Image (tube, rainbow, N blue to C red):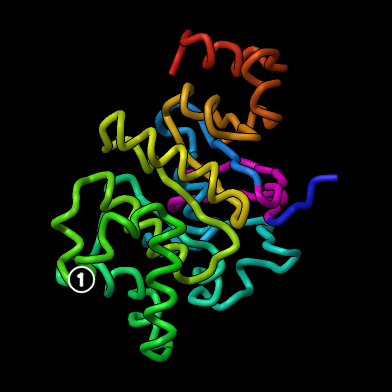
Amino acid sequence: MESTVLKAIDFNAYFGKNQVLKNVNIDIYKNKITAIMGPSGCGKTTFIRCINRMHELTPGATVEGKMLIDDEDIYKMYPILLRRKIGMVFQRPNPFPSMSIYENVVAGYTLNGIKISKAEKDEIVQDSLQRSALWNEVKDSLHKKGTFLSGGQQQRLCIARAIAMKPEIILFDEATSALDPISTASIEELLFNLKANYTIIIVTHNMQQAARVSDQTAFFYLGSLIEYDQTNTMFTNPKHQQTQNYITGRFG
């Protein structure tokens, strides 16, 4: 039996009067990689921004329905505590430019005023960089700026920064779309290794990537969740014509 870590129930999201998510119901399973795919403007990014309550940072943005993490209502939690449980990695690598590699990894603690000892910081930095497969490349240059790294290394630094807060869930919003194929392959390999300890949700335009890395796939279209199934089932035997059309490239 799959263990559900995140659940959306009759979930709707709006920008002003414009409804961008329509009655979404989905269970996200623990220690699985779930891909969210669909054409541009279908609500993919809005959906994951609702999971860590970044959606509400946009003026006029509202939600209805329920979003639960471990059966607790996300929208009744203190946002900073919620974002410790749910890390996020964005489309473009965004290490803090004024900070060293070391400072970037522990930035979540610093920026939220969470006091930890130097020894704890050292341990978190090493552990997070090892988990994000970056430690061996940067261990001798931890006090250099994160921006001197290559694009793929910068994205792994951003993953280390997310891991450092010991989240349950990590959200990846098109996290490889700005990277070259070799860096993309290394991030995909990293995702496989990370799912042993984290639940991972990836938004991707890249169907081949969804097919390669995910256990479950959700197909969104015009704000609605059209289909949600095991990835191999959806790609070989989709239940809905819209899903079939998208997968075979008839629209998108």
Near-viewer residue (36 or 54): 36
| Mark 1 residue element | loop
Taking 44 as reference, is 12 above or below it?
A: below
Q: Give the class, few, some or many, for how many residues have Cα within 10 Å of label 1's Cα (few <14, many ≥20).
A: some
79 sits to left or right of 119: right
Q: Quadrant of the N terminus?
A: top right
Residue that carries the numbered disc 1 in the rendered image: 100
- The image position of residue 31, as x and y in percent, is 66, 50
Q: Is residue 187 visible?
A: yes
Overall secondary structure of the magenta section: strand
Q: Is residue 13 magenta?
A: yes
125 sits to left or right of 244: left
Q: Which residues are magenta?
A: 6-31
Q: Quadrant of residue 104?
A: bottom left
Q: Residue furthest right?
A: 1
Q: Is residue 55 visible?
A: no
Q: Is residue 4 magenta?
A: no
The amino acid pointed to by label 1 is: Ser
